[in-house]
Image (cartoon, rainbow, N blue to C red):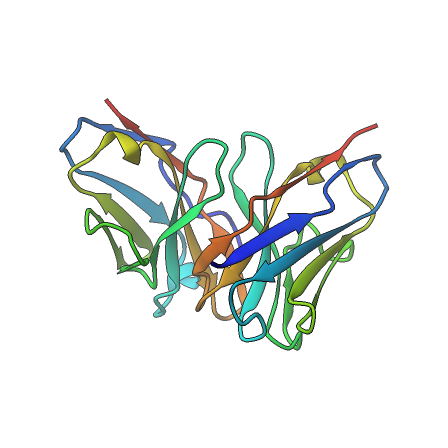
Amino acid sequence: EVQLVESGGDLVQPGGSLRLSCAASGFTFSPYTMHWIRQAPGKGLEGIAYISTTGSTIWYADSVKGRFTISRDNGKNSVYLQMNSLRDEDTAVYYCTRDKSTVAFDYWGQGTLVTVSS
Amino acid sequence: QSALTQPRSVSGSPGQSVTISCTGTSRDFGNYNYVSWYQQHPGKAPKLIINDVSKRSSGVLDRFSGSKSGNTASLTISGLQAEDEADYYCCSYEVTSTSYGFGTGTKVTVL
């Protein structure tokens, strides 16, 4: 069974940092591009970062560029999101997703909540 | 990439058909078929229902169909059922910038 399990969400003050992790199981991890997608409370979906199979291609949404860093470890079947200089508007549920082709997110984690507040 | 535009809400009675539009620019859709649709029930993670404009994801009923014409993609739900009541999002990949974005989301209500 394919599973994506996010962890690391927490309450953090503005300007703080967090590192999210996503552990994948039930499939061969390395051939898939992986994404982080977030959803602010009561709002829509926002793709914020993706990393290709070997990490050679990385993309960030303008809203997080320069503050967030995506990485992966194919040996540990995991993808990470380092979030620095957090802002109130980064408050959201963060989902880890698998891309089976191009923007075909066929598996999603359960999400991890990041709350940025003083 | 700017957010793709969807109607805020659509509704229909059981058994009817509803269509959700997703409007972008020529850069959003171009000559490529990188459009997907997601269904999200409250408190749940989104679920892929359509990818590559019109390919139904595994296990998705043929009541769901997708299409694209010019700068607008569409999702049609036929034979509307109570369990179809959810939020729906389109998504497209922009080849020139290698970026992607989601639509604004549409709430489907079954009357």
- Residue B32 pos. (x, y %): 36, 69
Q: Which of B92 and B59 is in front in this view?
A: B59
Give the residue displayed 77% in from the left and 57% down from the top: A66
Q: In this view, does A81 lie above or below B63?
A: below
- Residue B110 pos. (x, y %): 25, 26
Q: In this view, does B43 lie above or below A16?
A: above
Q: Nearer the viewer, residue B5 or A18?
A: A18
Q: Is residue A59 above or below residue A61?
A: below
Dividing the picture into quarters, in which one does residue A4 lie?
bottom right
Left or right placement of residue B94 versus residue B110 in this view: right
Q: Is residue A4 above or below residue B94?
A: above
Dividing the picture into quarters, in which one does residue A41 lie?
top right
- Residue A64 pos. (x, y %): 70, 52
Give the residue displayed 59% in from the left and 61% down from the top: A24
- Residue A67 pos. (x, y %): 78, 53
The total of numbered circles placed on residues is 0
Give the residue displayed 36% in from the left and 49% down from the top: B23
Left or right placement of residue A42 versus residue B89 in this view: right
Left or right placement of residue A4 versus residue B109 in this view: right
- Which residue is farthest top? B111
